[in-house]
């Protein structure tokens, strides 16, 4: 099915998927349109009408097939589109930012567990463990400054050492 | 006076009352009275009749029932988990995928104002903990919905959208 690709002014990639009912002239949606005086004669007319109505104005748009879309949406917010090659890609810096956001969501529970262990180490007087936990907690608090892998497959499940509770 | 032997009764008079209020075995309604009565019975509601929603004598046809204030004006079920796929819809021209968990539902026929009621919900999809869905913004011709995970980050899901109001 045809989809419409639009870059907004802030370089955000929008993907517009027409409703299948729009291409069925007998569908209730199309009949509703007809009752409002809008008659669309061909699939190209339908697509043009949708672009005119639903795509942001004054920006370029591209039509491609939905089979070109990446198989996974894990990096959706980092997707790019090369209209000349008709290919989707991934902006690695955006992908790293996505992974960091996911880790930010995990961090509080890890931090809570480390703090519990730290207090127990204080209670038992285990200085070695206490110092090791201090280092890990500090690393956890500043994990975003670590180097992240640029391989997308590795990045997808990347967990810095400071997130591992031994 | 005419006599009907089969009914063993006779007709006393012809009636012209188009409401056919009287019931009798001895009076007969004229053809015009019957036709007018039937025509009145089958008066089809216009869009205006539907929007006014006060008549109790006009009939509603499938092509106009959607104009009643109580009727759902837009609905859509879709999945955005692997790619955006519209599973079913009415009065939807397209969906705009604005990023993870962000979907704009575009209407073929706009509402007359933004004072319409709409609702967004999401399925819990497998291990993805989608915990909430919300209307992020609305205009007369579209509404943007967002689905969130447990830490309130927009997350892709199977989504549903419905809207009621005046168009």
Image (cartoon, coloured by chain):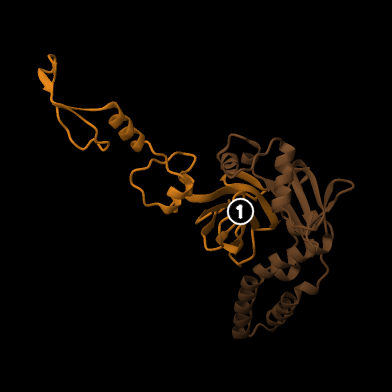
Residue B61 falls left or right of residue A81: left
Residue shown at 52%/58% (left/top)? B119
How packed mark 1 is, by other alpha carbons closer than 10 Å (few <14, some 14-19, many 20 or more), is: many
Quadrant position of residue A102: bottom right
The letter of the brown chain is A
Residue shown at 43%/48% (left/top)? B49
Name the residue at the left extreme. Answer: B8
Quarter of the image with the C terminus of chain A is bottom right
Question: Circle 1 is placed at which residue position?
Answer: B157
Residue shown at 64%/56% (left/top)? B104
The letter of the orange chain is B
Quadrant position of residue B27: top left
Name the residue at the right extreme. Answer: A84
Quarter of the image with the N terminus of chain A is top right
Residue A107 falls left or right of residue B119: right
Residue shown at 72%/76% (left/top)? A136
Query: Chain under label 1?
Result: B
Secondary structure beneath dot 1 equals loop
């Amino acid at each position: 099915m045809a989809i419409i690709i639009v870059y907004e002014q802030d370089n955000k990639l929008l993907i517009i998927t027409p409703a299948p009912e729009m291409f069925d002239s007998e569908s209730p949606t199309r009949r509703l349109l007809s009752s409002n005086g809008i008659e669309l004669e061909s699939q190209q007319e339908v697509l043009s009408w949708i672009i005119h109505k639903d795509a942001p104005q004054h920006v370029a748009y591209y039509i491609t097939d939905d089979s070109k879309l990446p198989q996974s949406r894990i990096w959706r917010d980092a997707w790019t589109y090369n209209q000349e090659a008709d290919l989707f890609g991934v902006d690695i810096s955006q992908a790293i930012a996505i992974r960091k956001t996911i880790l930010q969501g995990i961090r509080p529970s890890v931090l809570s567990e480390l703090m519990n262990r730290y207090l127990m180490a204080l209670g038992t007087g285990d200085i070695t463990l206490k110092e090791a936990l201090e280092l890990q907690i500090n690393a956890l608090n500043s994990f975003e400054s670590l180097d992240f892998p640029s391989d997308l497959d590795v990045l997808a499940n990347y967990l810095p050492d400071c997130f591992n509770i031994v | 006076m005419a006599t009907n032997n089969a009914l063993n009764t006779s007709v006393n008079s012809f009636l012209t009352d188009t409401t056919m209020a009287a019931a009798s075995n001895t009076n007969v309604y004229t053809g015009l009275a019957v036709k007018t009565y039937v025509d009145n019975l089958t008066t089809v509601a216009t869009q205006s009749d539907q929007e006014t929603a006060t008549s109790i004598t006009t009939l509603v046809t499938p092509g106009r029932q959607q104009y009643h204030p109580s009727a759902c004006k837009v609905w859509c079920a879709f999945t955005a988990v692997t790619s955006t796929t519209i599973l079913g819809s009415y009065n939807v021209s397209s969906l705009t995928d604005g990023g993870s968990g962000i979907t704009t539902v575009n209407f073929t026929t706009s509402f007359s104002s933004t004072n319409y009621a709409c609702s967004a919900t999401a399925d819990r999809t497998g291990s993805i903990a989608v915990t909430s869905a919300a209307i992020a913004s609305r205009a007369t011709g579209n509404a943007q919905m967002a689905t969130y995970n447990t830490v309130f980050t927009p997350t892709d899901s199977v989504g549903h959208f419905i809207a009621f109001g005046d168009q």
